[in-house]
Image (cartoon, rainbow, N blue to C red):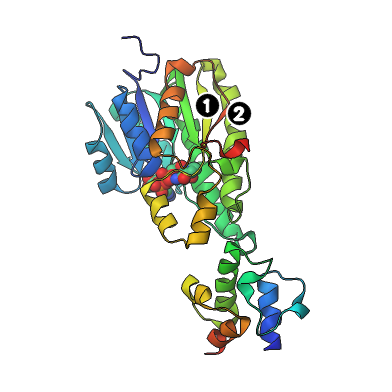
Amino acid sequence: MKDFIEKFAEAIEVEDVAALTAETKFHDLDEWSSLSVMLTIAFFDEEYDKQIGEKDIRESETIQDLYNIATA
Amino acid sequence: MFNPFSLNEKTILITGASSGIGRQCAIACSNMGARIIAVARNTERLQETLSQLKGEGHSCYSIELSNCDDIKSLVAKIVNENGKLDGIICAAGIERTMPAKLLTPADYEEVFRINTVSAFELVSQATTVKYFNAGGSVVLISSITSLIARQGTAAYSASKGAMVSGARVLAAELSKRKIRVNCISPGTILTPLMQNFLDTLNEDDYKKRTSGFPLGLGKPEDVANASIYLLSDASRWVTGQNFVIDGGFTIQ
Ligand SMILES: NC(=O)c1ccc[n+]([C@@H]2O[C@H](COP(=O)([O-])OP(=O)(O)OC[C@H]3O[C@@H](n4cnc5c(N)ncnc54)[C@H](O)[C@@H]3O)[C@@H](O)[C@H]2O)c1
């Protein structure tokens, strides 16, 4: 999980990784924008070879939710 | 009747005429009396544009503009079959919305090739003494992203900004023959494709993407009407400009 959070933070350009936990609601982060959706889709593709859609991201609330998709 | 915006007796070549803004420009110019040469990729959709034009003598040609080497021979063929040109509108274009972090050199090259390089190649091939009447006019469809930042459009904005700065040089070089070159920079125009795109956005993103226009979103007609002015003799003393048509977006 720690590894996932670090990589995710890097993908969406969040400096303060320490502030992120599995429970963080990523949609509420200051750094989150409509472009982050594309960055996250690219991150899943590159790191996990998983093709996810905007819908998956919209329906996820916490970083844990994303982790679950990545490891599913 | 006195009409300084008449395009009677003018032959106008329009790229991107199979859809959206280019198609509406073709319709509008034909309404003002012009003979239209509609250019784009898809012949079927070009035919559909022709069927919406007023008057006689219009024609269409299919080309893949990213093959810039094909432009020279196409221009020769067009002039051979239709006579000399009086105007050009370059409305063909693509967008690639992505955070700059994800854009590759190949993305930049493709966007530049279609939006900018092909337009400049067309203008330089078509505005020769042999192919273009003195006093004619060229209109390049840029975008307000040539002036303002819209996130996710680094390649597109750069290609549109390059159009605006290149157009000034073309305008200076072609002024000897009283040929004018201007850009139109539209804000968000509700073309069918733009409408489809907006329909995919959630409520928040939709609001963000469509707000900031004091006069609301634009219609293809708003750009087409500006192109009539820039192609007509009414604008004979206007060249090298970037005409912003954006419902007031960039004033605030
Ligand atoms: N719609 C807007 O809100 C808006 C705003 C500002 C600027 N613009 C610009 O206006 C122009 C027209 O946009 P639109 O919204 O009507 O787009 P559109 O997608 O409806 O039409 C694009 C046209 O370009 C042609 N085209 C694209 N790639 C081509 C290629 N490789 N070879 C040949 N033809 C090709 C297509 O065939 C089509 O006719 C574009 O340059 C766009 O950047 C649009």
Image vertical order of residue A56 relative to residue B200, above or below:
below
Q: Amino acid at mark 1?
A: Val
Label number found at residue B168: 2
Front residue of this view, candidates B124 and A2: A2
Report which quarter residue B243 is drawn in: top right
Q: Which residue corresponds to the image point at 39% horizontal and 46% vertical from the top-left?
A: B191
The reply to whether discs 2 and 1 touch (Cβ–Cβ < 8 Å) is yes
Q: Which residue corresponds to the image point at 52% horizontal and 48% vertical from the top-left?
A: B113
Q: Which residue corresponds to the image point at 61% horizontal and 58% vertical from the top-left?
A: B105
| Left or right: residue A24 compared with residue B54 | right
Residue B224 in view in this figure: yes
Q: CA distance from mark 2 to mark 1?
A: 7 Å
Front residue of this view, candidates B83 and A11: A11
Residue B69 in view in this figure: no
Label number found at residue B181: 1
Q: Position of residue B242 (x, y in %)?
A: 57, 31
Which quarter of the rendered picture does the N terminus of chain A lie within?
bottom right
Report which quarter residue A45 is drawn in: bottom right
